[in-house]
Amino acid sequence: MAATLPASWQPVLADEIAQPYFKELQKFVAEERQAHTIFPPQAQVFAALAHTPYEKVNVFLLGQDPYHDDGQAHGLCFSVLPGIKSPPSLVNIYKELKSDIGCRVPNNGYLVKWAEQGLLMLNAVLTVRAHTPNSHKDKGWEKFTDAVIRAVNAKEDRVIFVLWGAYAQKKIKLIDAERHVVIQSAHPSPLSARSGFFGSKPFSKINAALREAGQPEIDWQILDL
């Protein structure tokens, strides 16, 4: 049984999930689950879409591949479940959040609070084999998540697209940058954070763009659990 697309996204993605490639992708993931441990669990594959309904999306943060270690991935890019140590990219996100707008670093990496405020936190690839990064790359997920980007781009209201790193920045061709806001910088991973992520002030820029669009700002402070 494949994971079900959340209700608010079904009308905008109905044509996409009816395509042959999507059925092949679902078959591939199901076979992988039979033979290997796959993250995130099946019920959380579309968690980003479930936590942020289509009509609520006002910011879109694009990740690449789900976390591949035990208990980390739960369907939101950069976020981990309560009780799991924050991975290095998220540690750097918290450092920038503190220096940008003064948020205290919390004791967890569970970012659902952001998603519930209209921040769609979607990876380009939605599943991964345990301990094997990029193992589900080029199997069809990218085609599906490109369709999600196009659907959000088609919204009448202004959306802020946040593209961290070269991989995410390739998606700019799917975005009408005249109508929407695009915020780009280096990726927060330890390999690149010092070459343009630190000091990029994405969180204050996002809130400024939301204010300008007459939308409520995001409360970025993640609470301790």
Image (cartoon, grey):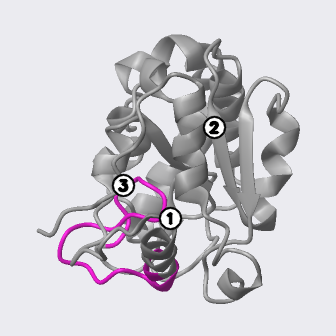
> What residue does disc 3 label?
220
Q: CA distance from mark 1 to mark 3?
A: 22 Å
**Residue 223 location (% of width, % of height):** 19, 63
For label 1, the residue is 66
Which x, y percent locates residue 88?
48, 85
Locate residue 208: give its quadrant.
Answer: top right
Q: CA distance from mark 2 to mark 1?
A: 22 Å
Q: Is residue 19 above or below residue 21?
A: above
Q: Quadrant of residue 195?
A: bottom right
Specify few, some or many for label 2: CA neighbours under 10 Å numbering under 14, 14-19, or 20 or more: many
Name the residue located 74 percent from the left edge and 65 percent from the top edge: 185
Residue 86 included in the magenta stretch of the image: yes
Q: Earlier in the sequence, mark 2 or mark 3?
A: 2
Q: Name the amino acid type tagged 3.
A: Trp
Q: How many marks?
A: 3
Name the residue that disc number 2 marks: 160
Of the pair 127 and 193, the residue shown nearer to us: 193
Q: Is residue 19 visible?
A: no
In magenta segment, residue 199: no
In the displayed structure, does residue 183 sit left or right of residue 217? right
Q: Name which of mark 1 and mark 3 comes first in the sequence.
A: 1
Q: Which residues are magenta?
A: 72-91
Which of disc 1 and disc 2 is earlier in sequence?
1
Residue 222 found in image quarter:
bottom left
